[in-house]
Image: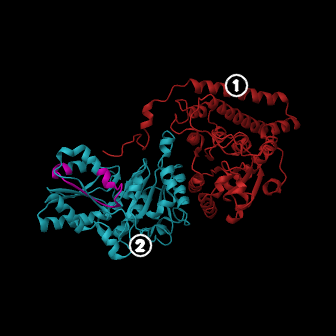
Chain colours: A red, B cyan
């Protein structure tokens, strides 16, 4: 992959603990999303859902690199990003199922996972909006002097909406501690991004318009993501301003529940399944001398967690209907008149 | 008491709150160094410095997104959208994000922020810089909507809006910026959700907002002096929360309601008040509810054309006389 941050300087090898953490986060994301898919097929999850299967390395790499109080802003494809901040699988599955065990007890749904106590500041379902909102959190951190960084994840399709460009310019001129991460999975929804974009690399090729370094990385290599994240977070924390990172990746499924993804050439799908970040990293762990037992233990533990979470979420009662009529206002109520 | 203009009261209200709370910050286009295109924020940069009073690019989505992100992480931002017509280019942040986030997150997120905006006609700016859009905001659950008519209310309601834990859209009528009025000395705060009864009569209750308030008062004077009709005038002040009780009490006394709106006719705020009064006070009414509005057409730029469109005292007098006579 041609660039920038990925080849600029030699990378120190990661320690064993970090490597195992990266693998654990990816495995948990994978099991969560596969289970979400299965529960949809069983009609236990309604509405829609946008799975991050295949894109786990981006979430895990950043999740491991971020400080506990750094802010995450994600899109509707945000289950992975929520999980890596420490939110329980039960609360995520519960929200997808829309019952009392859910993170928002069913008031938000799959596209709006938010957990303020984990600094997971929301999953946003209108393309582009949350880049501007991440700027606000970064401005607040800058004003309060907390050295927190806001990290904002979005898809390749977002690079063609106005808010993307407004947010980048704004972040640069105010030198905000924000890291913008484009997960380029090659398709906006059903249309290939290259068919609707003026440049080859939808985010990286726009960076220079805002005086930013183009950073294009292999988003399926979790260590590359982790190292790039660490650097960008450090720059932002030290007052060096924003970064724009384009992480090339691929979603294994369609855009959403309703989409089988048939518009993608078989050859392309096959090629990218060959670059699946999980088996790829598993192989590398073995190569660097991590024993099979340690890896298998992570997988067994994640399996146990997802099975337990599934049971807890499935068995939770529906939310009380009274909560549908609460919390429009700060006083907890919904009254607009006296 | 000091006499201030409506525009001076804006700066006075923001300054009062910035002095007492370091979490209050202010951003918008041309608001800092230039003091605002309507000169409503002159002096704030000098007093509070560039960390708290910030000029932005012409990027309405970025401005409101920044306000939202700051509000959800501990600040109390005031953002300016120069002309309320420009809400059309950033309505996603207002209607989808700011308005709904507390609800969608099951109450996890508070958004104590204020969006100030120059609203309404009478300044000959044409169809894209003259609209009254407070009814757009009123249609979205989760937004408080305030529109003051006097300098005292500008300062007091702005202070209350900044202290409020919920997002407030604060509509300043552009043609009122130069008007003057007495503003109480010292800390001045006017609670949201309280209509103000400006005069009491026996024959008809006129409900008005912003620029329509002085026109309704003028109409009431003409009605009394020239036609022997005594009118109550209610300044609604806040559409959300709406002080329904004051309106119902005043209409119950006079038996007649006339609303005076700058909004174009369809779904203007007066329609909601008319509906409430019809539903809850029907048997006390002595005649039909009358809405005086701008017709359902875009605003023209030329003096005489715009004046022909927006309600004024003569039009109010004519409609009240039809109702009462």
Quadrant of the rendered image containing residue A46 = top right
In x, y percent, where is residue B292?
27, 61
Q: Which residues are magenta?
A: B251-273
Quadrant of the rendered image containing residue A194 = bottom right
Label 1 CA crowd tier, 10 Å (few <14, some 14–19, many 20+): few
* The C terminus of chain B, quarter of image: bottom left
**Left or right side of B215 for B167:** right
* The N terminus of chain B, quarter of image: bottom left
- Chain identity of mark 2: B
The residue beneath circle 2 is B125
| Front label number (1 vs 2) | 2
Q: Are marks 1 and 2 in contact (CB under 8 Å)?
A: no
In x, y percent, where is residue B33?
51, 71
The residue beneath circle 1 is A304
Task: Say which of A154 and B295 sits in front.
Answer: B295
In the rendered structure, find residue B260 and report the number of the disc placed on it: none
Instruction: Tell me which residue sits at (70%, 25%) in the image.
Output: A304
Kindly state the secondary structure of the residue where label 1 is placed: helix
A292 vs B126: above or below: above
């Amino acid at each position: 992959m041609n660039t920038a941050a990925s080849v600029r300087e030699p990378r120190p090898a990661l320690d064993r603990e970090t490597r195992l953490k990266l693998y654990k986060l990816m495995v948990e994301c994978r099991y969560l999303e596969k289970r979400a898919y299965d529960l949809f097929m069983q009609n236990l999850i309604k509405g829609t859902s946008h799975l991050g299967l295949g894109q786990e390395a981006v979430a895990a790499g950043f999740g491991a690199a971020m400080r506990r109080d750094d802010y995450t802003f994600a899109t509707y494809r945000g289950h992975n990003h929520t999980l890596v901040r420490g939110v329980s699988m039960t609360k995520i599955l519960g929200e997808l199922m829309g019952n009392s065990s859910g993170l928002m007890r069913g008031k938000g749904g799959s596209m709006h996972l938010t957990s303020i106590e984990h600094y997971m500041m929301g999953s946003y379902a209108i393309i582009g909006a949350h880049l501007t909102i991440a700027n606000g959190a970064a401005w607040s951190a800058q004003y309060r002097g907390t050295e927190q960084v806001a990290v904002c994840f979005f898809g390749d399709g977002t690079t063609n909406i106005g808010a993307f460009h407004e947010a980048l310019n704004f972040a640069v001129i105010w030198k905000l501690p924000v890291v913008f991460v484009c997960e380029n999975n090659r398709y906006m929804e059903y249309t290939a991004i290259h068919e609707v974009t003026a440049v080859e690399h939808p985010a990286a090729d726009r960076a220079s318009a805002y005086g930013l370094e183009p950073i294009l990385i292999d988003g399926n290599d979790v260590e590359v993501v982790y190292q790039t994240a660490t650097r960008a977070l450090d720059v932002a924390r030290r007052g060096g301003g924003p970064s724009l990172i384009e992480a090339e990746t691929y979603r294994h499924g369609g855009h959403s529940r309703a989409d089988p993804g048939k518009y993608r050439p078989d050859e392309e799908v096959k090629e990218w399944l060959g670059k699946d970040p999980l088996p790829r990293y598993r192989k590398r762990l073995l190569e660097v001398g991590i024993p099979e037992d340690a890896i298998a233990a992570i997988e067994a533990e994640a399996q146990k967690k997802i099975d337990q979470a599934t049971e807890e979420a499935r068995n939770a009662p529906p939310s009380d209907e009274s909560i549908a009529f609460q919390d429009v206002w700060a006083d907890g109520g919904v009254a607009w008149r006296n | 008491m000091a006499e201030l203009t409506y525009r001076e009261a804006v700066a006075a209200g923001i300054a009062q709150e910035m002095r007492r709370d370091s979490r209050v910050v202010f951003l918008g286009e041309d608001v800092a160094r230039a003091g605002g295109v309507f000169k409503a924020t002159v002096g704030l940069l000098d007093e509070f410095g560039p960390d708290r009073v910030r000029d932005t690019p012409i990027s309405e989505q970025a401005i409101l997104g920044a306000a939202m992100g700051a509000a959800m992480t501990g600040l109390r931002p005031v953002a300016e959208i120069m002309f309320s017509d420009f809400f059309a280019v950033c309505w996603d942040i207002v209607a989808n994000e700011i308005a709904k986030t507390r609800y969608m997150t099951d109450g996890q997120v508070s958004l104590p922020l204020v969006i100030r905006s120059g609203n309404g006609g009478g300044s000959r700016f044409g169809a894209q810089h003259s609209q009254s859009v407070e009814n757009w905001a009123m249609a979205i659950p989760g937004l408080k909507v305030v529109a003051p008519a006097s300098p005292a209310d500008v300062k007091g309601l702005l202070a209350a809006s900044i202290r409020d834990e919920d997002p407030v859209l604060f509509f300043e009528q552009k043609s009122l910026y130069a008007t003057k009025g007495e503003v109480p000395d010292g800390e001045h705060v006017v609670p949201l959700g309280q209509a103000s009864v400006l005069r009491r009569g026996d024959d008809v209750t006129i409900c008005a907002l912003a620029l329509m308030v002085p026109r309704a008062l003028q109409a009431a004077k003409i009605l009394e002096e020239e036609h022997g009709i005594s009118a109550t005038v209610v300044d609604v002040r806040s559409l959300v929360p709406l002080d329904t009780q004051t309106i119902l009490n005043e209409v119950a006394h006079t038996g007649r309601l006339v609303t005076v709106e700058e909004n174009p006719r369809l779904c203007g705020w007066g329609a909601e008040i008319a509906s409430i009064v019809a539903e809850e006070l029907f048997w006390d009414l002595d005649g039909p509810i009358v809405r005086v509005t701008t017709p359902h057409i875009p605003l023209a730029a030329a003096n005489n054309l715009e004046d022909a469109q927006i309600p004024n005292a003569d039009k109010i007098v004519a409609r009240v006389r039809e109702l009462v006579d």
